[in-house]
Image (cartoon, rainbow, N blue to C red):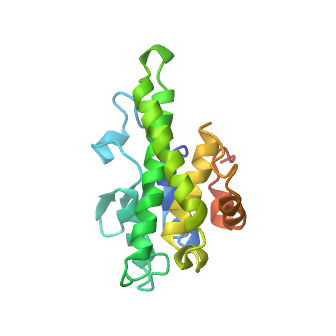
Amino acid sequence: MQLYVTFTSPYARLARIVVIEKALEDRVEIVEAKTRTPDSPYYGVNPSGRVPFLIAGSGLQMEDSQVICAYLDNLDGKPRLHPAAGPDWSHRRLEASARSMLDGIAVWAREMGRPESERSPTTLGHEAARTQRIADVFQDAVTHPVLQAETNMAQLVLAVALETARARKFGDLTEGRPQLAAWLAPISQRPAMLATAPGRPR
């Protein structure tokens, strides 16, 4: 299988983390894609130009980190990062909230990447405020059993969101949120998180 990524994309990072968590390194080749480049050869592989993008051994192709992570987790028939939906859908709800935070940080970072004269103060303010509100929620929500259980996607998405905020100069979302800081410390030390950390030499 080939997993197309960029090493700056937090969404591609999630797929790379699952490859390591599920010990799939011998089955999945990580391929660096050139995106946001006119006439990139990658557009012949994936016309949308988005990452991550997976080509399975059967020729099956898929994009979107949620789909790819679930597929990789299920390859052995023993998914452990995507628990079955409970009566209140706790795992899915918490993962969605963490992903909303990650989306806000990604939009903010893209906007900041524009020339200063082209940036939208409205967009920057909206995404910054949204991200801070969600971080306030997770300051308390990290005590939820799903976020205290064995490693799962809700935890991984939240951890990647928090580390992306630091890496993209949004700021440290654990500052002033001691429970969130204490929660992030051990998960950041997982081998899959360390191996895919932003800025790590390839």
In the image, is 47 to the left or to the right of 189? left
In the image, is 132 to the left or to the right of 202? left
The answer to which of 44 and 62 lies nearer the viewer is 62
Question: Which residue is rendered at x = 65% and y = 48% of the image?
Answer: 202
The answer to which of 178 and 48 lies nearer the viewer is 178
Point out the image quarter for the N terminus.
Answer: bottom left
Question: Which residue is rendered at x = 28% and y = 65% of the image?
Answer: 60
Please give the count of numbered marks on the rendered protein: 0
Q: Is residue 14 above or below residue 40?
A: below
Question: Which residue is rendered at x = 31% and y = 47% of the image?
Answer: 46
Residue farthest to the top, as pictured: 117
Residue 116 x %, y %: 50, 17
In the image, is 103 to the left or to the right of 24? left
The answer to whether one can see residue 66 in this image is yes
Q: In this view, does 102 lie above or below 15?
A: above
Q: In this view, does 12 lie above or below 185?
A: above
The answer to whether one can see residue 34 in this image is no
Res 33 → quadrant: top left
The answer to which of 182 and 2 lies nearer the viewer is 182
Residue 181 x %, y %: 70, 58
Residue 159 x %, y %: 59, 59
Residue 72 x %, y %: 43, 71
